[in-house]
Amino acid sequence: MKTRSTRSSASAAALLALPLMLAASLPAQAATITASAFAAQAIPSAPVDASLNLVNGDFTILANPGAGPGHVTGDGVDETTRWTFDFSSHPEYAAALADGHIVQARLTFRLATQFFVAGAGPWTDIAFATDGTSSVFPGWNIPSFLSGTLGTWEMGTITTDLIGNVGVNGTELFNFMASRGGQLPFQYADDAVVGFAQLTLVTAPVPEPAAWMMLSLGLLPLAWRKGGAKAG
Ligand SMILES: [Ca+2]
């Protein structure tokens, strides 16, 4: 029943968008921007009371008073860490902003933990972009890549591509960053101290200029016909 109106509004939207798409394809090119966050101490020498946050360089380790007796902030157990990747001053930020889409988001952590379960850590940890209110999912479920003994600190570095490996949507991540003026807030939880974090974003037009050209030269009508047939 609603097939006809859906199809015609989709066609109208595509026609309106076409000149914009072509114009956008001309100046945009891939850009690579990197931002890093550094801890003052890889392992905090003086954890604080569980009711207090601990600022460790660029990282803020959040209080977790509900964690139970004996818990402190800064021992890398049951605690959430927040920081912000600042891309705004990167020389290629303006070029990245013009692209509107991220194709690769390589996230690297240097982590220290003393919390091992069956000799493996960090345990059930996750990282994702969030300002505490809105977030970009899915988060990166970090594998237990360190081995050690409960109570003894171990440190290591791990990296992933949030888009290629984790499945984050590149446009959603871009919008999250761009709407905050190049500031990308992040969170890690909960059984390691983050000593260093780096995020490298590779941006590109959506889709690539060649794809826009193909669309405008003949594939677009074909796609409409296919869509129409499916809808009917
Ligand atoms: Ca955990």
Image: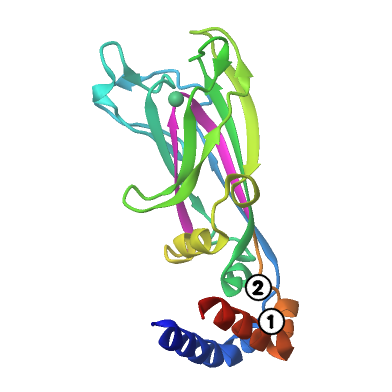
Give the residue number, with chain letter if any, for mark 2.
Answer: 207
Q: Nearer the viewer, residue 152 or 215?
A: 215
Question: Residue 222 lies in magenta, yes or no?
Answer: no
Earlier sequence position, callout 1 versus callout 2? 2
Q: Amino acid at mark 1?
A: Trp
Rendered image: mark on residue 212: 1
Does mark 2 have its CB less than 8 Å from ligand 1?
A: no
Q: Residue at x 54, y 14 (%)?
A: 153
| x, y percent for residue 186 | 45, 45
Q: Are marks 1 and 2 in contact (CB under 8 Å)?
A: yes
| x, y percent for residue 20 | 57, 88
Label 2 neighbour load within 10 Å: few <14, some 14-19, many 20+: few
Q: Secondary structure at mark 2?
A: loop
The colouring scheme, among rainbow, by chain, secondary structure or one colour, is rainbow
Label 1 neighbour load within 10 Å: few <14, some 14-19, many 20+: some
Q: Quadrant of ligand 1?
A: top left
